[in-house]
Image (tube, helix red, strand yellow):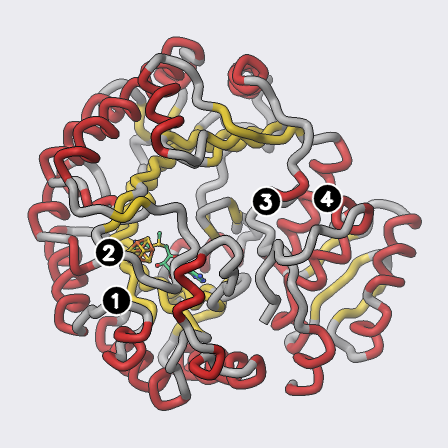
Amino acid sequence: MTDLIAKYDRPVPRYTSYPTVPYWKDAPTSAEWIESLNRTFSRPDGPNSDKSWSLYIHIPFCESLCCFCACNTTISRNHDRYEGQYIDCVLAEWKTYLAQVPDLASKTLKNIHLGGGTPTFLSPQNLARLLKPILSAVNTDPKGFEGSIEVHPNYTTEEHLKVLNELGFNRISIGVQDFNLSVQKLVNRIQPPKVTAKTVDDARKLGFTSVNFDLIYGLPGQGMEEMQYTIDQTLKNMPDRIALYSLAIVPWIKPAQRHFKDEDLPAPEEKRALYEYAKTRLLNAGYIEIGMDHFSLANDDLLLAMNEGRLHRNFMGYTDQKTDILLGLGVSSISASPDCFHQNQKILSLYEAKAGDGEVPTMRGHKLTAMDQKIQGQILQLMTGFKTRFLDAEQEAAVTERLSEMLKDNLVSIENSTLTISETGKSFLRIVCAAFDERLAKAKPEQNTFSKAI
Ligand SMILES: C[S@@+](CC[C@H](N)C(=O)[O-])C[C@H]1O[C@@H](n2cnc3c(N)ncnc32)[C@H](O)[C@@H]1O
Ligand code: SF4
């Protein structure tokens, strides 16, 4: 494995979308984006279109900065300034959409996800002020509606969870990252295990049906002993799902990551060994590996979806709830329709000015070509099922050449025009996806765009 890592570890996209964000070129105007939403809702019914939709709301605020963090955040303790004005702007953005895309009110909303930042930066009362007008204007799925939220236990009270539960939220994703005080000090995130355990208990007592833990491997100060402790503590809580993320190191985007000293970070082969150790422990404890870096208990919906070939992946990670439309509200939120990506203004003041004025706060996006959509489907198949069929002989020849070394190393195999990733090859999944990425092949990114694969 050490030799393979030395041979293949290089910067590649994470493929939460195809084309990946640096290759978004043909941006829709706000009017074209609205048109794409209306067009999608009015398509005839078909196997791939059930007209339901998903909603994401981004709350960017955090009280203090964890220095590993690659998310879009605004660090402040000024709750008065941020809670009131921001909620008004998100509600104004929602009203703009509702007026221009009336189907949002009548078609089924399958799930809502609150992400951040720290969504519980908002008080319980303000969470209700934000969510009630939205949820009361739409039709939520009577059978399987999912409401999920990302929480940092230090800032999450029982009252927060109670209000969310009353609004129909049933899934909680808890940011843990690492349970060791030594690591937590290095990343500026002191989070005692008992605080995490209390959030788990509160959520379960209130009736949340799914608890997820986010863990990260490759953090500064993390060695085998620390990973052992983190997994021990994780197993005490037995979350239904675990995301075990590789630390993405992108200091050119996130200068706070410059606080790490290189010597504090595990070397690439040590980093991979941490993942393999954690994976073995989780599998032994009854978890099953889902796609890339995700694990779930045997009775979890993600596993069912994987076994039935319904597993899906979007900007938020793996999900069993595929919808044609993902609408993102809030600063920097990304939305997707079958033929368009759309991202909101990333700078808070610009977002608030536009959304508050009743405009769709478009910053950038991409209109997908027919070829983009086909490759998007293949990358999704690789990410969710580790195999895909070539589109034609030309693509097969190009990909075969790009992966010639990986074929020799038995990391992938090709038979009957279908590429399959081997068990060992799964560690290099993003590199395989990159071989299908025609936009990457045509124009290499400028230096320092993507984090490394391992
Ligand atoms: C928006 S944050 C989570 C919610 C909450 N703010 C918290 O910290 O608990 C989403 C997740 O992204 C992951 N994450 C953030 N920065 C990362 C990085 N540089 N590399 C890998 N994962 C990262 C963390 O696991 C984090 O829990
Ligand atoms: S990890 Fe979570 S709490 Fe920490 S800075 Fe990032 S978004 Fe905020």
Indicate if the residue with disc 2 has its beta carbon within 8 Å of ligand 2: yes
Report the front residue among 26 and 432: 26
Residue situated furthest bottom in the rendering: 225
Q: Tag on residue 189?
A: 1
Q: Amino acid at mark 1?
A: Arg
Q: CA distance from mark 2 to mark 3?
A: 29 Å
User: Percent position (x, y) of residue 74?
Assistant: 31, 44
Residue plotted at (25% across, 53% down): 151
Amino acid type of disc 4?
Ile
18 or 304: nearer the viewer: 18
Vertical side of 101 occupied by 259: above or below: below
Ligand 2 quarter of the rendering: bottom left
Residue 357 is drawn in which quadrant?
A: top left
Amino acid identity at mark 2 = Ser
Mark found first going from the N terminus, 3 or 1 = 3
- For label 1, count other residues whose C-alpha is less than 10 Å away and answer few (under 14), some (14-19) or many (20+): some
Residue positioned 80% across, 58% down in the render: 418
Count of labels shown? 4
Horizontal arrangement in the rendering, residue 44 relative to residue 290 (left or right):
right
Residue receiving disc 2: 64
Residue to which mark 3 is pinned? 17
Q: Taking 24 as reference, is 134 left or right?
A: left
Query: Which residue is label 4 attached to?
Result: 375
Q: CA distance from mark 3 to mark 1?
A: 29 Å
| Residue 353 in view, yes or no | yes
- C-alpha gap between disc 4 and disc 3: 11 Å
- For the residue marked with disc 3, what is the amino acid? Ser
> Which of label 2 and label 3 is nearer to you?
2
